[in-house]
Image: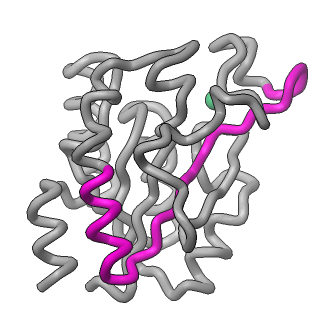
Amino acid sequence: MHNKTAILVIDMLEDFITGALKCERAAATVPEAAKLLRGARAVGIPVIFCNDAHREGVDLELALWGEHAMKGTAGAAVTAALGPEAGDYVVEKRRYSAFFHTELDLLLRELGIKTVVLIGIQAHICVQHTAAEAYFLGYDVVLCTPLIEAFTEELKTSAIGYMADMYAAKTVTTDALLEEFHG
Ligand code: ZN
């Protein structure tokens, strides 16, 4: 599978891990996420960071959540242990879905990607909306469940169940993925 697979790293940004909307559960996944990304890069699987980058005074989400991941600020940076590294891709987004009015679908198509592996946060918000649109567009969706987090275990579990049921998302562990990449 792996020459047609990419990893989408959703919103692993400073504001969501240590800042304005911090999630300690996400912080705990960083070492294992870094290991997955190293394994992916080693076999040429594209790593695509899908990052909130909001426009001040414009983006509608800000009224609901307050200011977070404002474009160009330190809070909008990917947590340093994950990247981006040379050869990684970065797609900026202004909505929950990494596909909505971004270049992500064009990038995936030009890379020949058929399967997207999702990791990151939050399970029931940006991960779920990105999984929905990936499914609508015909991509196979894989969820690396130890590396997908939310504010609570209940939110995480229910979102993963919903994505498995509605988008035929396959759930895997980090080690199983790494084995598949290197197999
Ligand atoms: Zn946002």
Residue at the spot 47% in from the left edge and 81% down from the top edge:
113
In which image quadrant can residue 44 be found?
A: bottom left
**Which residue range is magenta in the image?**
34-59
Position of 179 relative to 100 (above/below): below
Position of 51 relative to 64 (above/below): below
Q: Give how far across and how far down residue 39 sits, in percent.
A: 26, 69
| In this rendering, position of residue 161 left or right of residue 64 | left
Residue at the spot 59% in from the left edge and 82% down from the top edge:
109
Q: Give how far across and how far down residue 76 sits, in percent.
A: 65, 33
Report the image quarter containing ligand 1. top right
Q: Give how far across and how far down residue 84 sits, in percent.
A: 54, 56
Residue at the spot 21% in from the left edge and 78% down from the top edge:
181
Query: Does 35 appear in magenta?
Result: yes
| In this rendering, position of residue 95 left or right of residue 148 | right
Farthest right residue in view: 57
The answer to which of 176 and 62 lies nearer the viewer is 176
The answer to which of 159 and 25 lies nearer the viewer is 25
Query: Does 58 appear in magenta?
Result: yes
In which image quadrant can residue 36 be found?
A: bottom left
Q: Give how far across and how far down residue 139 sits, in percent.
A: 43, 71
| In this rendering, position of residue 96 left or right of residue 120 | right
